[in-house]
Amino acid sequence: MSENNIQEQISELNRKLDMILENIEQQRRNREKVDDLVADLSIVAKDAFHHTVVMLDKSQVDFDHSGIPMLLIKILQNIDTFYEMLEMLESARDFMKDISPILHQVGLDAVNKMNEFDQKGYFEIIRNLTQPDVIAALGRTSKALAETKMDEKLDNRSLFGLLKQINSPDVRRSLSYTLRLVQAMQPEKGNSR
C-alpha cells in the first residue's frame, strides 16, 4: 500500500471515529436531558401527591387504594364508550361552528321582522290592547257575546218596534258609539297599512 492510501484510510477512520464520538456525546446529552426531566417530574409528582394527600385529609376523605385497579379496569373496559363520547363532543363542537352563522342570521332576521312590525304599528296595537279600559271593554263584550243568545220572541220585532227602541237614549248612544267605532276601524285614505 502506498503512503497516500494509508493516510486516506487513517483520515477516513478519524472522520468515522469523530462521528461515533459525536454520536456518543449527543446520546449522553440526551440521557442527561431525560434524567433531568425525570428528576423534575418526580419532584412535581411528589409535590402533587403530597398536595393531594393534604387536600384529601382536610376534606376528610378516606381513600381506598384497592379501588384504583378496579377504576382502571372499568376505564379500560369502557374505552370504546369514552372514544364515542369524545367523537360526539367533537361532532357537537363542529355542529356549533356550522350552526352559529345560521343562528346569527336568524337573530338578525328576527330583529328586522320586529322592526318591520313596529314600523307597521303592530306593537302599538298590542300596547293599546293592554290598556285597562280596553281590557274591561273587551271583557264586557265577550261576556255579552257569551250570554246573549238569539231569541225568536225578543229578536223578531217589526220595523216599528225597532224604531220605537231607537228612540230610547241608551240605544241611540250605543248605536252612535258603534258607528264611531266602525268608522275608526276603517283604514285612513292614503295611509293604509
Image (cartoon, rainbow, N blue to C red):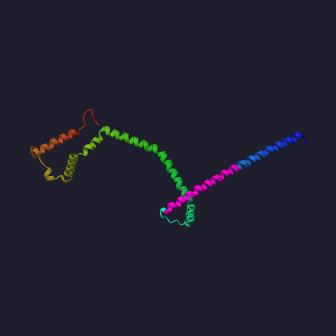
Image location of residue 4, percent across then percent down? 87, 39
Q: Residue at x 34, y 39 (%)?
A: 115
On screen, 59 above or below 113? below
Residue 2 or 105: which is nearer the viewer? 2
Residue 39 or 125: which is nearer the viewer? 39
Q: Residue at x 63, y 52 (%)?
A: 37
Residue at the extreme right of the image, as rendered: 1
* Horizontal relation, residue 71 to residue 127: left or right: right
Image location of residue 100, percent across then percent down? 46, 45
Image location of residue 148, percent across then percent down? 18, 52
For the C terminus, the quadrant is top left
Highlighted magenta segment, given as a residue range? 28-57
Q: Residue at x 13, y 43 (%)?
A: 173
* Horizontal relation, residue 113 to residue 74: left or right: left
For the N terminus, the quadrant is top right
Q: Quadrant of residue 78?
A: bottom right
In reply to whether residue 188 is colored magenta, the answer given is no
On screen, 119 above or below 138? above
* Horizontal relation, residue 20 to residue 160: left or right: right
Residue at the extreme top of the image, as rendered: 190
Total count of labels: 0
| Magenta segment main secondary structure | helix
In reply to whether residue 45 is colored magenta, the answer given is yes
Image location of residue 141, percent across then percent down? 20, 49
* Horizontal relation, residue 174 to residue 12: left or right: left
Q: Residue at x 48, y 47 (%)?
A: 96
Residue 58 or 61: which is nearer the viewer? 58
